[in-house]
Amino acid sequence: MSELIQHLVNALILGGTYALLGIGLTLIFGIMNVVNFTHGVLYTVGAYVMYLAVAALGLNFFLAFPVAILGGLLLGAVIETVLLRPFRGSDIDTTMLVMIGAGIAMQSALLWIFGGVAKAIPSPFPETPLQIGPVSVSWLRLFVLGAALVLIGGTYALINRTRLGLAMRAAFQDADTAALMGVNTRWIDTATFAMGSSLAAAAGALLGPVYVVTPQMGGLAELKAFAIVILGGLGNVTGAAIGGFILAIAEELGAGYVSSGYRDAMGFLIIIAVLVYRPTGLFAKAERIG
Amino acid sequence: MPGRFTLSTAILLALTASAVAADPIRIGVNEPLTGAFAASGTYVVNGAKIAADEINAKGGVLGRPIELVIEDNKSNPTEAAAVAEKLITSDKTPVMMGAWGSSLTLAVMPKLMDYETPMLVETSSSGKITTSGNPYVFRISPPSSLEAETFAPIADKLALKKVDFLVLNNDFGRGAAADFGKMLKGKGVEVGLVETMDQGAQDMTAQLSKLKSSDSDTIMITSSVDQLVLLFKQMAALGMKKRVITTGGSQNPDQIIAQAGSAAEGTMHLTTFLPWMPGKTPSPEATDYFIAQWKKRGFQFAGVTESFRGYDGIRTIAHAIEKAGSAEPAAITKAFWSVDFTGLNGPIRFAKTGPAGKESGQSKPDVYLIEIKDGAVVVPTL
Amino acid sequence: MTRLAPLALLAALAALPLGLGTDPYLLNALITTGILTIGAMSLNLLLGFTGQLSLGHVAFFGIGAYVSALASLGFEVEVGFGLRVVHEPWPAAVGLVLGTLAAGACGYLIGRLSFRVRGAYFVIVTISFAEVVRLVALNWVELTQGPLALTNIPAVTLGLPGLGYWTLKTKAQNYYLVLAVGTLCYLVIGRLVGSRFGRAMRGLKENESLAMSVGINATRTLTVAAVISAAMAGAAGGLYAHYLRIIDPDVFLFATTVTMVIMVVAGGKGTLMGPVVGGLIFGLLPVLLRPVMAPEAQWIVYGLILIAILFAMPKGIVPGLRALGARRRPASPVLEVNPAVQR
């Protein structure tokens, strides 16, 4: 029993960052109709910014985190302006290929700059875990979960409570009508992509200190983000949040009770099963975001 | 135009210089410089360079300097085989060193048969390497069976009762679990779970949670240093208190101390080199020289437990070429059998192992158990 | 002119080893280029002619490689309930055929699925399929040796009873084998595209509801295209396994799919020659770039080239050149014998 509880606690903590990844990706798809193949690289970039800030510049851990988010925000805005704006109106396959090209180039650039050797980010948390009965949780992981939940809450507030969010929701419903009503859809696209990117970077900055940082770390994260988004339904923010936790539970229990080698296969099996039996996702209400 | 004049003079001088110097003997080095094992492979290559420079400073081998042709196998078996083929056919290296991991080495071995070129194996520990009947393989690292054999008396002293394994999902890890498991069972020690992990895996909490709730007293872990650091951190996060013993000799205890901090406290490691106490190594002067060179080049001390293999590997190859009297693959293969000198971790001489008629060479290095205590490496008194 | 170009290219490629001598490095680059080009041609059948963007194409390539290698190496696995399956080694040529068939069978599944899910969903499901297959290859150690790689895969032996056999061990022999299979695939695709079936495929791509209203069976057409495409990718994978004589789960890496996609998109999707031209350019580019830059820098260049082509020449090189030629000689009656193929 205590083993099961430990597995579920592990999953809860992982689920927070998975949800962040998924929400970022699903926002971009829902509003811009772009499948973002740079999402994994942005996750990696977040981790490297965190590494540079903490390990190389000696910045405080808690100050470095917002810096990493800001880095993702800026890089996302640049990608959207330089690479996606010229392709507005192109079909989804073309933008997908553009994003694949950008993703490959950026990941190789990271490998070129930082080399293949893994980097560790020191964290200020004590090594001794928090012990609740038979279950232990490290303080770092608790911080990761807390930060992820705050960011998820912030994203919800932004979408539901602000003018920008209102415009985003309008653009999601019908971009053309929104444009007619005076919504600057170009600005909405840039804002959406930057926001989605910053969430990916945040996830990377949070998991970087838990694991180690490598240029390839984003590849698997990106595929998991796809799984989460499909699970929740493309464009469905709540679905992505729940999907993140479901994937984490499936992985953790799969690794604990079936076979640890197939841990990463869980996400893909979920994708295939969902698409065969319920192609619109588990929470089919693609009518609105938020 | 004085500028042009100097330039062409320089070229002329360079040409004359290279004409005077004897043709170098090329030694292929096939190591992972990117990918999962990048850190270790880079250490080995840097150790190899120290050996090459030392040998060349003393006049080279057979009156010719040696030249290392270093290629990256990207921690991938297919790439390792391609690199071996390139080294043999394009670079014409008569002998090679490689390929760090067991899977990488096993992938290269058919190429050695195809082109009848010998390779010195400096790190790999799978038993299969020297028992599959490949007469071009000469290994200076201990296979896991040899490691297990050396560990047997230590196991008695530790009074182990039940042991779980957590190993890499490859020849290196699975081989260690099999060999150590067999040895322990023979002593009446119970063997519990055998959990595996991928070489690139970063989150092992699921496996660890499972091991945490088992009733064993000890976990034996076989992996490389980066994953060990993650494992110790994640074990601390789960509040695990079991005895931990790592095998395989790729642990870099100093890197573990630096990166895992207090999470590594009390962990034990089977290692093949004692750079922390040069006086206790089989040839203290050589160890001192090597460590001094390593530090002079500005490398991290943590790397020496890997890099000494590269150093000894190239020295072994140089001895073989010297004995062969020529830089031909066939002559070098034959000469490996008569190599006999003291390396940094014991005598290097090859014993025949594997099927009769096509034996591989296996040297028998020393194996030591060390413990991390108060952030430093000590040899535990048992 | 346009008709002669493929023949001229074939003649040039056939004569190439004679001119190059036996430089192993260049021949090796040409062989892997050829194998990837076959993969690109097969991807083009889906991506170019039916408009289905399959980003899991490397799965078929890898399945072909593993099935072919395992059939010729033999294996013994436990399949549950204490049952063991033992397979004695078969000749490599038989393995190649089996690999092709197995990949085709998997193509059938994906083809059926492609009709259920479209667009972004189809793309993601194909990627997931490739990842699952990779993880199986990595973890079913008893069968595939997992990360240890399958080694000692035999080279292909060709021959007829009574005429003698010969084993393709040298690079030059493998080169001609790849060239022969590549030419065969080219001809098959050419015939297919020029047929009624080809018109059905393009009809579906242009306007699905219109195509279906004139009686085109969409499910059947897409499935058949997927099966043929997957089988060809499987054949390429089999050639790869028996040429390198070692394969590991990294044959399923996404980067290989991306390479094929770049070849197709750059060369010109939906044209017969496009993937061949794209394949030769991007297969041999590493040879040119290798002395100048590190591999990771090469991949930066590839990514940027993909974006640049989508910007400047969205139809690809072959249609771009053709348009250029047509503009220069507007009066000449271009040999548009089969407009369907020229598209």
Image (cartoon, rainbow, N blue to C red):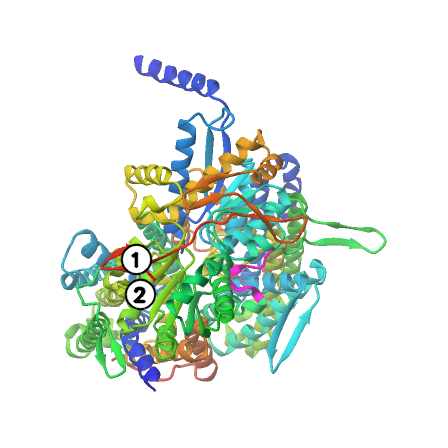
Q: Which residue is mark 1?
A: B256
**Can residue C49 be seen here?**
yes
Along the polypeptide, which appears first: circle 1 or circle 2? 2
Number of marks in the image? 2
Q: Which residue is mark 2?
A: B232
Chain assignment, label 2 = B
> Who's the residue at 38% across and 16% down the image?
B8
Q: Where residue A42 sits: x, y (%)?
A: 29, 61
Q: Residue furthest bottom?
A: A1
Q: Quadrant of the C terminus of chain A?
A: bottom left
Q: Quadrant of the N terminus of chain A?
A: bottom left
Q: Where residue B148 sits: x, y (%)?
A: 47, 61
- Name above or below for residue C133 compared with residue B338: below
Instruction: Please report the bounds of the magenta region as a residue range.
Output: C144-151
Mark 2: few/some/many CA within 10 Å (<14, 14-19, 20+): many
Please tell me which residue lies in front, A67 or B82.
B82
Please tell me which residue lies in front, A249 or C264.
A249
- When asked about the image quadrant of residue B160, the answer is bottom left
| Three-letter amino acid code of the residue under disc 1 | Ile
- Name above or below for residue B165 compared with residue B30: below
Q: Residue furthest right?
A: C162
Q: Is residue C22 magenta?
A: no
Tag 2's secondary structure?
helix
Left or right of A123, for residue A22: right
Answer whether labels 1 and 2 touch (C-beta < 8 Å). Answer: yes
